[in-house]
Image (cartoon, rainbow, N blue to C red):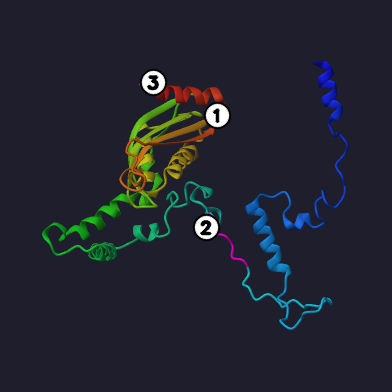
Amino acid sequence: MSDKLARDISELNLSPPSTSSSSSLPPNAHVNGAGYSTTAHTSISDHHHHHNTQPSSSSSSSSSPTTHHPKPSTRPAPRAIDSPLAIRPASPYTLNPPIDSDGLSWPSVGARKRIDSTPEEAELREKRISDAVKVILEELGEDTNREGLLETPERYARAMLYFTKGYEDNIRDVIKRAVFEEDHDEMVIVRDIEIYSLCEHHLVPFFGKVHIGYIPNKKVLGLSKLARLAEMYARRFQVQERLTKQIAMALKEILKPQGVAVVIEATHMCMVSRGIQKTGSSTVTSCMLGCFREAQKTREEFLGLLGKR
């Protein structure tokens, strides 16, 4: 057997590959796409041909070279590809300070105008919203004069103003005098705070529970104020990720604690009642600041306490 193996090895051609033109790659192989798949090769070849071949004259039959002067390109410049990164706002909410000098927290563009409105102006705003809703109902093919829809535009206008009232809330009025000096440096958690908010992408509700924890630094906050803080940010057009971060950043600004942790578990009607329609799905988001972000054991203790029911 060993003799046969030695004979087979001796018969192998171990010489270096020939460098003749018949077996080597052509000089312009890098242009013509050698080594690419068939699809890629075709694409590259077509691209090369398109850019380097000029149409020949019908009367030119001789083999003498002809000088071609390329015409300037009249094709428009390539358009920038639209992507989420290209269309994001230049300054997301949470890049700004949590609390403005007047006590508003990440207000909308028109929040101060809503706050300063006279009763007459507020009534006109509600009327404009209800008129717009009436147009929507009519465009959907409904009869806005039938009994069931007769006052629906006005009801909807009042409901939307309530659902977005968090923009008008002043954080000083929310917290009031509920910050107390206390020599306590262990974890404080309020969990299962119910929230109801509106998805800003589809204007349909998402709802669930917020769990808020922090480790005091000589100051504690009245427990009900944690729920009020969550309510203030939920009553806006929101995405769950931003809502989670806003609650955590505001609490950090108010108390200056050693750390803050916020977890939200929510069901989104834009995912349950439309689109993919996955009724059993829920979304969990978290924001960890201070020692909750830096110390794994602290974070694990918080998450472990949330799991105990």
Residue in the foreground of this view, choosing between 213 and 66: 66
Q: Is residue 147 left or right of residue 189?
A: left
Q: Which residue is mark 2?
A: 87
Q: Amino acid at mark 2?
A: Ile
Q: Amino acid at mark 3?
A: Lys
Bounds of the magenta span?
A: 78-83
Q: Which residue is mark 3?
A: 308
- What's the residue at 82%, 56% (across, down)? 27
Residue in the foreground of this view, choosing between 44 and 300: 44
Q: Secondary structure at mark 2?
A: helix
Quarter of the picture containing the N terminus is: top right
- From the image, give the main secondary structure of the stretch colored magenta: loop
- What's the residue at 65%, 76% (across, down)? 74
Q: Which residue is mark 1?
A: 291
Q: CA distance from mark 3 to mark 2?
A: 42 Å
Residue in the foreground of this view, choosing between 54 and 179: 54
